[in-house]
Image: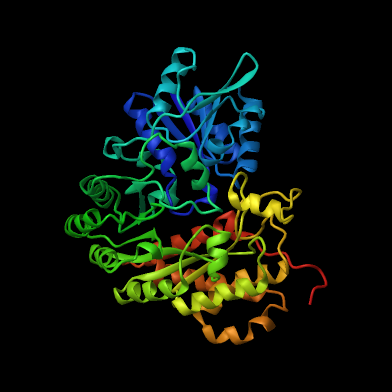
Amino acid sequence: MKILFIVNTKDLGFEEPLGALYLSSAAKRRGHDVRAVENELTSVEAKIAGFRPDLLAMSVLTPSFPYLYRLLRDVKRRHKIPSIVGGPHATHFPEILKEEGIDYVFRGEGEISFLKFLDRFEKGAAMDDCENLSYMKDGQMRSNPLAPFVEDLDSVAFPDRELLGGYRQFTESDVRSVMASRGCPYQCSYCFNNQYQGMYKDLGKRLRLRSVDNVVAECKALKGRYGARMIHFFDDIFPFKPAWVEEFAEKYKAEVGLPFLTNTSFNVCSEQYVSALARAGCKCLLIGVETGNEYFREKILFRKMKNSMMVECAKLVHSHGIRIYTQNLIGLPHGSLELDIETLRVNIALKADYAGAYLCQPYPGTPIEAIAKEAGLFDADKEFNRSFYYSSKIKIADREKVERLRILFPIVVNFPALHNFIYLFLRFPSGPWGVIGKLLHGYKIKSAILRYNMSARSFINHTKLFFRRPINRMVLEEKAGEP
């Protein structure tokens, strides 16, 4: 059977869409012919004409759903090809099945159940026992139960890197994406993991680790076959089980020897953990601070961390030569400009090497949405933007100044003396600061985030990708006549 994945390449940088690549690998092992095409109408139509697929497949996030759906709808109006939509948005909102052009919705983890669906689809068989699937039957929407989590992650084939072989942003990148684990230990109010864990209650362990040998084997293949010079571990939180991380430090260093970056939390940054990551070759850690106010962090965002603990952990991380990229949310429900400036001060205290600030997004079904609605701070008429940088459905007090603070945030953290003039800067349009901020981000890509022996060509490619992505090209619209 021929399957065509429509991949949202336009919003991606070098980060590979691992969900689609895992499914493609599983489908190819079963003998199916799988291809990919970028999310652009003329490209999709050209690929359909040459490939003649039996099924269209697409994975969507909530902010990208509106424009990806419009693409799928337009394609379906021209070509009567069945379609299946998966990914986080489909998982949490299977009712999108009722939209024109969507024939099937796939929820949750897919490597096993997706193959069952393909088998039923190819034979024209009933879908009643196909786990994770939502579909229409007799004019009614039906959602089958979820299959348990895949417990043995080593049994899952490596992602199909060949699927995107025609796209230079991936083939010319020497930074490759890997997941060593699945699942997150936290239930943050702003994240879909909160709901996801509830959906999978009693269906297996939410935190699962691949064996070190399995992870190392994939990284060795990326180094040898694809010329990887750095690995981006895409885990929600990089594995912090002591025995696992110690074994990883020894084997990864000896058999792979590539620098890497990954996500973690200050809560797990023990001396043993950070030391093991440093020995393995970790160059940068992406860590959520979220807000500088401990009460808001615990009661609004469901993250319990003391500022003093974070400062000590940041010192520990820096002492091992690892850079810190912090992630922060501003414009919180019940928040204020002063609260967001408090977050700025905490990042200065942490001496973050780069501090990203994003507008808080009350995505549907998350606790943060309920908090915003209960407080009358949810703007139902405002659409979700494809980027979490530039728009939010939360009614933010001092919105213009908060949006300017988002642009100033990383600049001031890197040049703390500017903090003394922050209120003055917030009075004026932020256009020039936006240019400085992008230049700073470009510099930090090389000096803090992607710290590897990067060629001039690679640096140019990374910079071009950053500026070419639509979510990074959007600009803050200043109100006319504003001082």
Specify whether residue 450 is in view.
no
Q: Position of residue 91 (x, y in %)?
A: 53, 36
Number of numbered discs present? 0
Residue drawn at the location 59% of the way across and 50% of the way down: 367
Q: Quadrant of residue 120?
A: top left
With respect to residue 262, does 324 lie above or below?
Answer: below
State the residue in front, 227 or 312. 312
Quadrant containing the N terminus in the rendered view: top left
Residue sticking out furthest to the right? 481
Q: Position of residue 406 (x, y in %)?
A: 61, 69
Residue drawn at the location 65% of the way across and 27% of the way down: 98
Q: Position of residue 150 (x, y in %)?
A: 35, 35
State the residue in front, 32 or 149. 149
With respect to residue 115, does 306 lie above or below?
Answer: below
Residue drawn at the location 29% of the way across and 73% of the way down: 320
Q: Position of residue 110 (x, y in %)?
A: 42, 33
State the residue in front, 73 or 63. 63
Relative side of 56 to 270, left or right: right
Specify whether residue 289 is in view.
yes
Q: How is the image coloured?
A: rainbow
Q: Quadrant of residue 296?
A: bottom right
Relative side of 359 to 16, left or right: right
Q: Quadrant of residue 20?
A: top left
Relative side of 335 to 280, left or right: right
With respect to residue 369, does 439 lie above or below?
Answer: below
Quadrant containing the C terminus in the rendered view: bottom right
